[in-house]
Image (spheres, coloured by chain):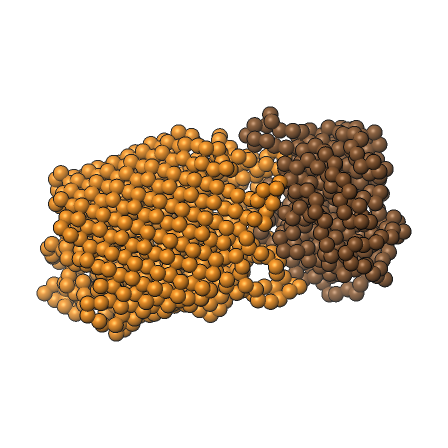
Amino acid sequence: MDWNCEKMRTATSNFVIVGIVIAGFVGCKDDPAGVLPGDVTATARGVYILNEGLWGQGNASLSYLDFDTGQFTDEVFRTANGRPLGDVGNHIVVHNGSAYIVVNNSDKVEIIETHTHRSLGTIDAGAGANPRQIAFVSDTLALLTNLYDASVSVVNLVSQSVVGRIPVGSNPEGIAISSGKAFVANSGFGTGNTVSVINVITLTVSKTIAVADNPADVVRTSDGQIYVLCAGAYGDFSDPNDDTPAQVMVIDPLSETVVDSVFAGGHAFRMSAGRNGRAYIVADVNVLEIDTRNHTVVGPFAAGVFYGVGVEEESGDVYLADARDYVSPGRVVIYSRQGLMRGEYNVGLIPGRFAFNR
Amino acid sequence: MRGFATSQETCQDQRHYQPSREGAGADCSERIALTPASTEEAGVFHFWARMLLRQTVGLLPTLTTSLYLLSLPPAISSAASSGRGESRDSAVSVYPLPEVVVTGTRLEAHTSTSPTSVVVLSQHDLRSKPGSLLASSLESIPGLFVRSYGGGASLRSVSVRGMGPEYTLVLLDGQRVNSYQNGQVDLGVIPLMGIERVEIVRGGHSPLYGADAVGGVINVFTRKPASTFTAGASLSAGSYGYRAAEASLSGTLGRFGGRFAFRNERGDGNFTYPYDDGITSTTLERLGADYRMNNAEGRVEYMTDDDFETSLLVSYGEADRGVPGPVTSAKTSGGARLADQAVRSRWTIDWRPSADKRLSVASAFSYAFQEYTDPSLDLGGSILRSVYVNRHATIAPAFEFTPDHALQATTGAELVRAWVNSNELKTTVRWQQSVYATLRYTALLPTKVPHELVLYPSLRYDHFSDVEGALSPKIGLNLGLLRDPVLRIRASYGRSFRAPTFNDLYWFAGGNPQLRPERSVSFDCGLYCALDMLGLMYLDISYFTMDTRDRIVWSPANGMIWSPVNVGRVVTQGAEVEGRWTGFRGALSLALNSAWTDARSRRWGDIHDPADGKQLVYVPQQTVTATMDLRVAGFHLFVSHSWVSHRYTTKTNDRHLPSYAVASASILYTPPIEFLAVTLKLEASNLFNQPYQILALYPMPLREVRATLGLEL
């Protein structure tokens, strides 16, 4: 269940472009569909691992670990739907009993039902949009960043279509919503240093906030603040001395200002936050643990080179994605909140994102 | 009467089947003498004709060579066929002898006596096959695999024996064509215009040619001036907006010869293809794949007498192409463009102070500009724009010594300066100094079986200013077992290497200047057989192994910056079988060839490699091609059918593209018109409209037809 669920129940919104009809399936309860032969049936609790796949090969895939049965299954999307997921699976979010998978180079968002993994529809992001990440305003409205279009798409979840675009900065990547605002990281493909603030009522940019170099991931912490992970600029690639280090910018969503920063170092580029006052950052050679209550680095959480991180909110378990050499199947390593390794699974090509199913 | 075809018959055949008479005219008019010589025991008749071919081999200029009558099917086998009926002794078989080639040894050798397998594409082969690009002529050669990103003038590269395109050295009249920047050759912009013949040798040949000749060498020979004045023109049209026009002038006046040619080719590239992603099943049109190419070349030669010749060749090519990316949705748009400009010049001097010595000097310069843009990729407010300017200059003296028929040796040097300017690489210069020596020693044995042994030792050293040098030795042999039928076995063993490219070393984001050359050791053996079986049957079988270490592999280093390191190893083995039968006085030729390639990644040192033991991506394990060549009453029909096995698309071989079979055909008609050679050619590729992909998500065109009308005075 998306942590925004309760807030979404009571959210009301006036939309500028098209009136949204609230469909009958708004809610946070799953409504399992019929089961086809060959389907992979999941229980209520588990985690999706989104494997990006190789660019231009069309081999993105979805793995699933069922918490209740302990069963791990690869290629759940392909098995359930009889077709490949697409090219470059970049982001996945479970919202309202459905999983939304942003398939970057296929310009689409796949929607699946989380019990059977069967398709509930496909959102066409538009040719050349290159969607990156999705965030949910309500059960009927979502926002989708478009990497090469300098825009954020407004998505009608009922009609499963893009109904408009909001211009933002260059190469938007991460997006997160807090206090009725969407915060969009304008990476500039490594040269950007701003965050666009979108009013989710008016669906317009209300402010542009200056941050550190190369903003990438954006998360909402348990206390409602916005963390923007800025991966740092490279400058001259052959001269590491002119690089700017990665740091987390802490934004107060009410004042729309940067109120603090957390030094991460290197070129950390992925981040995930739990409900337990902890956030985890994938840095160059390890994963850092951050205390989001006082904006400090607790210390290295795990050593190694990883590509993605996710936090299971109930247990606080940390899931780390290891892409290995990026051309061979990767693996996922699970650590307890205390840093004890709990499990390891081989997954698909370039695992990068996690979405927890509750 | 000895059984042999006269030179006149050979010339007539060539004129009949080759409307462009440049090559034929030069051959026929310059035959000086026919000196029959034979060994009575074998019953094989050798004909020596000293003639000045004015070919350029390696960076050597023209050669004076001994030539056996051409008989390699399907080119001029009618000469051989006519010889049969004139044989004095009906119990003795007459075998037209193979072509003389130079690429496999840097010396004159027949395809049958070469230490490695050599495939020759004659001008006849090049013109009879469908397609207007060099790439299309290479597609059915066993052991070669042409990777194409679509139709028209799309990017194409060739790999040999499972090794990638950066391991295949392409020469143009001996001049390196491979980019120093990425080590590859884009065959999508090389037309057949001006190409006389192509010699293909498979296996490691760095001891002869230096860096990158690991999988094989493709040596393209351009046409020389015709002995008489000729003027030609052709017009072509075909599917998907294909249009081409070509014109040429060629001739010799006194001691001067010249050849000039121009070609314009364009197309819309908007072929249709089936699309099915499980949601949408439809037929789409390939967008943004239009192209336009212009090519021009000029060649002038001056010859004082048989002992001295100098020539200057300048060629220019430009191309503007749409390069749509992989088809990842039903609405994939194409906006990326690729612009190329290339200028090549070569000046050669060839001097024979005596009959057994030759001194030559070749100097060459190459300039290549390439710009890639993609307006759909907004990178921090700017569109993606990559610019590369590659240049290299070469001076190559060589000395050849032929004291007698048994021994021939050549030694030479190369001084090369290569440099690149780009917005994505550091400006860099590479100096290369190389020396090489190779010889051929032929020993006639006192026994009947075997009767002849030919040895080919070679050695080369390459020194580079920015990477380690390489010493490349090789030993080859060819053993004649039988004369009738002809049966010979061959073997070679040597070391080759691939030098890190400028991209590997100096790429802005992650280039590694500490890279070492990749090293390989290769072994090759085979047999060649020619026998009389209701016609002429040729069989050539090769087996090879190759072990390449220190392979350069790009992998993520710090953060998301990828960097190359020498950590890979690949072990390759395989076999190639080529069989051809020619009968009915050369009117019908049937060929069947197949290649098996097992190219696997191997664990190197202590580094964990999940791909250990897996087939390399996009390397088919098996290919089979069958061809038929039929000539009747001015018509020439060529049909080819190729099957390619599945190809893995991931290192761990958990995904693959299915096998595919593609047929093509062409028919040429040359009406018997005096004073004017007219040719009408109709060709069809993918005859049976098969949807297929060579590379994942890059559809190939369905059936494509073209028509060409050629005129020549």
Residue furthest right as drawn:
A10
Residue at 56% across / 48% down in the picture?
Answer: B375
Residue at 50% across / 57% down in the picture?
Answer: B289
Q: Give the side of residue A178 with respect to residue B524, left or right.
A: right
* Percent position of residue A126, x then y: 66, 56
Residue at 44% across / 32% down in the picture?
Answer: B428
Badge count: 0
Q: Give the side of residue B384 with respect to residue A186, left or right.
A: left
Chain B on-screen colour: orange
Chain A on-screen colour: brown
* Percent position of residue B249, x then y: 25, 56
Residue at 71% across / 40% down in the picture?
Answer: A185
* Percent position of residue B464, x then y: 38, 31
Give the camera-side residue of B605 and A141: A141
User: Can residue B21 be seen in this snapshot?
Assistant: yes
User: Can residue B48 be seen in this snapshot?
Assistant: no
Q: Give the side of residue B713 with respect to residue B170, left or right.
A: left
For residue B456, which quarter of the picture?
Answer: top left
* Percent position of residue B645, x then y: 49, 59
Above or below — where is A177 with respect to B677?
above
Residue furthest bottom as drawn:
B633
Give the camera-side residue of A128 and B57: A128
